[in-house]
Image: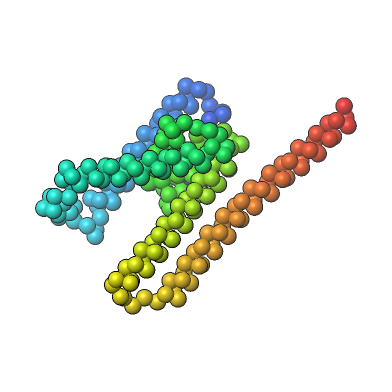
Amino acid sequence: MHLLVFDFICSMRYNVPYKIKQFLFVLIKLSIVVSAFCFMYSKIVQNENLEFNKFVAFLNENDVFSVKNSLILILLSSFNWFFEILKWQHLVTIIKPISFKSALEQSLGGLTASLITPNRIGDYGAKAIYYAKPFRTKIVLLNLLGNMAQMTITMLLGAIGLLLFINRYPIAINFYKIAGIGVLIIALGLLVFFSITQNVLNKRVCLRFYYSFYKINSNKSA
């Protein structure tokens, strides 16, 4: 379903008149934002495991959103998003240099789409829409590569944190089971990544072969 929507949006950029295309894009953006807010509202208010009134009372009693805490939260969030946008800007430079403003727009668009799609898959399609059709496969691969690199760093730092925690607070943990699951996840991730990369490379090789074959035949005919 999501792939069909993505294909429709991609084809729409080239087959629909400019004014209608701009109107539809604004409509899609608004629908994504509204859907994201409705999704977050339903998760917070209509959550069976969370009583919203008690949750609000808990926040007020503990002064969670004090001026100090709010400033720290905004500062850390700003740093996080600054580096996230900078990361995307440098990744895309391999294909096409973009400004920080464009990277900001694409990152926020990807985040909004990821909120209402399973496993944040909307992030890949939303960022790819900003580029011409020949670059979209590379954009998706770059996004996948960036997410995998970030996940690898998170797992390494998490493992270091877990070791420090266990060293201070001894608990019974089956390290062999954790190590086995970790190796399995890494192996599956690498398998998926290299499979996608290999398919893309094979397609590029085939396209180059057909182009060379067509060019040779055209020269012979001439």
**Relative to residue 26, is residue 72 depicted above or below?**
below
Closer-to-camera residue (19/219): 219
Camera-side residue: 69 or 40?
69
Whether residue 112 is visible here, answered yes or no, is: no
As drawn, 34 above or below 185: above
User: If the image is split into quadrants, where does the C terminus sit?
Assistant: top right
Q: In this view, does 36 lie to the left or right of 187?
A: left
Rendered residue at 41%/57% (across/down): 154
Residue 219 falls in which quadrant of the image? top right
Residue at horizontal 54%, vertical 62%?
Answer: 188
The image's colour scheme reads: rainbow
Residue 86 at x, y = what percent? Answer: 44, 40
**Which of the 4 image quarters holds residue 214?**
top right
- Above or below residue 128? Residue 149 is below
Give x and y (percent) for residue 136: 56, 39
Q: Where is residue 167 in the image (x, y as percent from the top left)?
A: 33, 72
Q: Which residue is drawn at 52% across and 50% down?
A: 145
Image location (x, y in percent) of residue 174:
40, 76
In percent of the image, x 61 and y 55: which residue is there?
A: 195
The residue positioned farthest toward the top in the image shown: 19
**Left/right of residue 217 with respect to residue 209 in the rendered view:** right
Q: Is residue 64 left or right of residue 4?
A: left
Q: Count up the numbered dots.
A: 0
Q: Can residue 165 be seen in this view?
A: yes
